[in-house]
Amino acid sequence: MSFQRIAWGITGAGHFLDRSYQVFKEIKLRNPEVSVNTFISRAAEEVLRMYGLEQKLVKISGGDYLEEIFRESEQGSSSPKVGRFGLDRYDALFVTPATSNTVSKIAYGIADSLVTNAVAQAVKGRVPVYIVPVDIEGSIISEMPYNIDRKLCRHCEECPPRENCPQGAITEKNGLTDQIDLLKCKGCGICKELCPYGAIKGGPVEVLVRDVDMRNVEIVKGLQGITVLESPEKILEFFTPEMDS
């Protein structure tokens, strides 16, 4: 199977986010002729910034036709660009990572965001849809954005991370460092490097997958035109060796 024109839908999950980015980066490196149109949900716009990936997306979707980056905040309620899925513009739509919220909406036919609307229109247009849910079964080890460990923080009056954050994302309360505003944070990691006490962290945490989320994934598996994948790396299997020549 060979895909030349694909769409990538990103929702607001941190888990699988960097791995998804690396997969599409690998696809573009190995197969420059493949076009990737990126659709970003409103929540994903925030999460991409938190994980320092917002500016890197141009390596995947450079801006030419069918290589644009569409943000939900810029598309309006009608999401007109998803109309392309009914016009034979794409060979496939990949949604990764897909939050439990996105999966539940798809399971019950709700299309009220840019990405869920894209899924609905893709199925109607007979474009195959591949979804990588973050919550499949058991528990997951998820990468968290930068945060302050209050057990290690000394609440220094002169805080190098706070004073040098280029986004002004580290807040101050009563003259002492308070917390990281994740809506401002762009995931650059400067704060972590500058904290002399190692109080700023970002890393793995175990999260339990809810029963309702597992049930919704099973519903999606049975839907017409949609295939559930267990990991972002499974996407690479859809790009045949012939495309590497």
Image: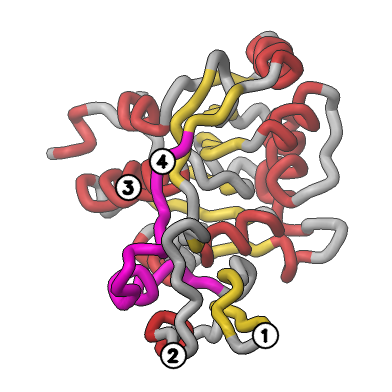
Residue at 33% x, 42% y is: 23
Q: Percent x, y for residue 63?
A: 47, 70
Tag 1: residue type?
Answer: Asn
Query: What's the amino acid at mark 4?
Result: Pro
Nearer the observer: mark 3 or 1; the answer is 1
Report if residue 9 is visible in the image: no
Residue 229: horizontal and vertical position, in percent? 48, 21
Residue 28 left/right relative to 98: left
- The residue singled out by tag 1 in the image is 174
Q: Residues within 10 Å of mark 2 (few under 14, many from 20)?
A: few
- Residue 189 within the segment the image draws in magenta: yes
User: Looking at the picture, does residue 10 appear above or below residue 178?
Assistant: above
Query: Which label is found at residue 158?
Result: 2
Residue lying at 73% horizontally and 70% vertically, measured from the top left: 74
Secondary structure beneath dot 1 equals loop
User: What number is the disc on residue 22?
Assistant: 3
Residue identified by numbered label 4: 204
Checking the image for residue 208, the label placed there is none
Tell which circle, 4 or 1, labels the residue nearer the N-terminal end: 1
Q: CA distance from mark 4 to mark 1?
A: 31 Å
Q: Is 30 in the magenta?
A: no
* Marked residue nearer the N-terminal end (3 or 2): 3
